[in-house]
Image: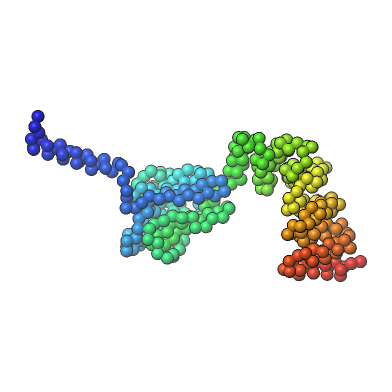
Amino acid sequence: MTLTFTKIVPVVLALLFFSDIYAQNVDIPQSSQRGAVSQRLGLSYITIEYSSPNVRDRAIFGGLVPYGSPWGAGDRENTTIQFEHDALLEGQEIKAGKYGLFMIPDEDHFVILLSKYHESWSQTYPTEQETVLKVSVAPQEIPHREWLTYDFIDKSSKILTAALEWENTQVPFTIEILNPNDVLFESLKAEVKGRGQFLWGANYDAAVALFSRNIHLDQALEWVDASLALEPKGNPNWRRGLSLYIKSRIIINKEGYNTEAKNLMHEAITLIEHPSELNRAVYILLENGDTKKAIEAATKLVSDHSQHPSIWAFMDSLAETHLEDGNKKQALHYYKKARSMAPENQHEYFDSVIASIENNND
């Protein structure tokens, strides 16, 4: 059958019409490319996704983006920010989840809005009921930035500063994890329940992580006991020594320097091989009035690590134990020996200590 021209034209027009409609529903390159930036804070990730338009010789803030009006903080699709755990944005609490990110620019401040809807178009601004967070921040002037960009411009262990940068304007805002210790504790429990339960290092490291923050000390004791079970008595090595040392310190934090803590520390110093750990044990003994055992530990430290670059510091520790014990003669002997080994920038310290002892010598 032969199609006439009058039959072909409607078919072609229909195909063109439907093609035009459905072309918007496929993934094709856009002039404002989609981008993402992600940063870990502690054990939690923060991710920002955005479209990145360029300036193209236009006035952006106060021009293309009017002052006082809501703006999608990007282009086309929603700019979004996702928090893996409950967080603080500029000090305000925000639950874990993904949010639409909007801004209201002004000359001297930008209002940041988070919407509970994150799949809307960037021109679909949140209502008051849909806004879950609203804060005001001060913009900063920066060198020209052609493409709109988000970045994490300051990163510490406890707080991040994220920022939008476009044209000559930077909009920084701070992010913190609301309960980082809770996040850590849940993560540790999950890890130690897995393969980690069979590993000395996993149990020991988990116990140390809790002890160093002085949190969940009962659980820390369970994990350090598990590490000791993997290094049983009669297996005298440095790993057992470290576990004994940490167990002693956990008990000290919980109950003070009782008999159990003392016995654990005494055994630990006979096994610890790493000089910095043994040196710390010396000062724990001193802090708790166990001076004779501190002298014993410091003597072992100096003897076992006589070739260490920090031998002068270990000698200083030994001198301090004797001074604490009231033996000024021995203290002076070791302080002078430490000074002879120490770098020149430490001589003033030793001269001061030595002079103080000599001037107050009975």
| Numbered marks: total | 0
Measured as percent of width and height from the top left, residue 265 is found at 79, 45
Q: Can residue 256 be seen in this view?
A: no
Q: In this view, does 236 lie above or below 318?
A: above
Colouring scheme applied when the structure was drawn? rainbow
- The structure residue drawn at horizontal position 79% and vertical position 66%, both measured from the top left corner, is 340
Q: Is residue 307 visible?
A: yes
- The single residue placed furthest to the front in the displayed view is 307
Query: Between residues 96 and 225, which one lies in front from this camera angle?
Result: 225
Q: In which quarter of the image is the C terminus?
A: bottom right
- The structure residue drawn at horizontal position 66% and vertical position 43%, both measured from the top left corner, is 205
Measured as percent of width and height from the top left, residue 305 is found at 77, 54
Query: Between residues 245 and 299, which one lies in front from this camera angle?
Result: 299
Left or right: 336 as drawn, with respect to 40: right
Q: In this view, does 313 lie above or below 118?
A: below
Left or right: 245 as drawn, with respect to 196: right
> Residue 320 appears in which quarter of the rendering?
bottom right
- The single residue placed furthest to the top in the displayed view is 1
Left or right: 261 as drawn, with respect to 98: right
Q: In which quarter of the image is the N terminus?
A: top left
Left or right: 138 as drawn, with respect to 300: left
Measured as percent of width and height from the top left, residue 87 is found at 53, 47
- The structure residue drawn at horizontal position 79% and vertical position 52%, both measured from the top left corner, is 304
Measured as percent of width and height from the top left, residue 153 is found at 49, 58
- The structure residue drawn at horizontal position 43% and vertical position 50%, both measured from the top left corner, is 36
